[in-house]
Amino acid sequence: AQSVTQLGSHVSVSEGALVLLRCNYSSSVPPYLFWYVQYPNQGLQLLLKYTSAATLVKGINGFEAEFKKSETSFHLTKPSAHMSDAAEYFCAVSEIGNEKLTFGTGTRLTIIP
Amino acid sequence: DGGITQSPKYLFRKEGQNVTLSCEQNLNHDAMYWYRQDPGQGLRLIYYSQIVNDFQKGDIAEGYSVSREKKESFPLTVTSAQKNPTAFYLCASSIPQLAGGYGEQFFGPGTRLTVL
């Protein structure tokens, strides 16, 4: 069975600092991995996805994530935080042959001016 | 523009009443999903449908019902049997893996349901 763990339900960083949001997954077969962002009272927007091509994936708004099979991780990073990055971020996994997405419980990112 | 629409944005219901949430997509996606979101619990799958006239229960289907009569529409009814229906409801759609998708889902803006 697939599962996702997001370490840290709340993360605060200063404007201009590195953003690092952690995601570890469990999957019995090669996974597909996703990061979504959610602003208050809105739906989820896809930031980026890993589909077994390049292990370093670049997404929208300057975010990127690296798939590390040995660590079963897919951490999300951004070199320099902006005030507009304040939102909730969800990591999700699907597997070949399983159409359903499994979501982590989310990480709320706060940007300190 | 292609996308997913949900209506209404906010919905208030009295206890004991059924209420139907609308979800429409013009992305030509075969699969559609309904999720419930509560603070600190992430997204929980209520129902999903991979093809017209067929749907399956998700993890928390009790007290909910759906229909899939058209490819573009997947309405969710919250019945009076749902004990704690106050939540944020999200609809999504995707391209099935057999049709070239990877499982990524595209979400609507959500409906916030409050039971008074």
Image (cartoon, rainbow, N blue to C red):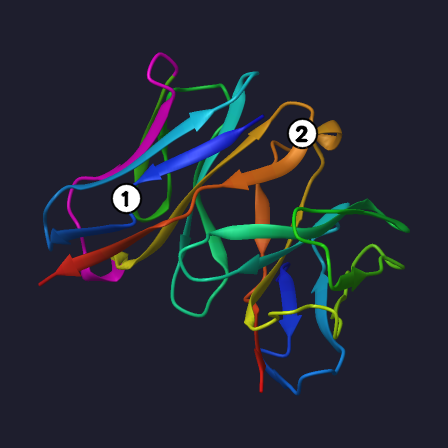
The image position of residue B31, as x and y in percent, is 74, 45
User: What is the spatial separation of the Cα atoms under label 1 and label 2, in whole angstroms?
Assistant: 30 Å
- Vertically, is B5 above or below A105? below
The image position of residue B102, as x and y in percent, is 60, 31
Residues shaded magenta: A69-84
Q: Which of the labelled discs sits on residue A43, or is there none?
A: none
The image position of residue A69, as x and y in percent, is 39, 15
**At label 1, which amino acid type do we have?**
Gly
**Among the two numbered marks 1 and 2 on one chain, the one whose residue lies closer to the N terminus:** 1
Q: Secondary structure at mark 1?
A: helix
Q: Quadrant of residue B21?
A: bottom right
Q: Is residue B40 magenta?
A: no
Q: Is residue B62 left or right of residue B5?
A: right
Q: Which residue is mark 2?
A: A98
Q: Which residue is mark 1?
A: A62
Residue density around tag 2, few if under 14, some if 14–19, many if 20 or more, within 10 Å: some
Q: Are marks 1 and 2 on the same chain?
A: yes
Q: Is residue B63 left or right of residue A72?
A: right
Task: Looking at the picture, tell me which residue is in the foreground, B13 or B94.
Answer: B13
Q: Quadrant of residue B51?
A: top right
- Vertically, is B14 above or below A74? below
Q: Is residue B108 left or right of residue A75?
A: right
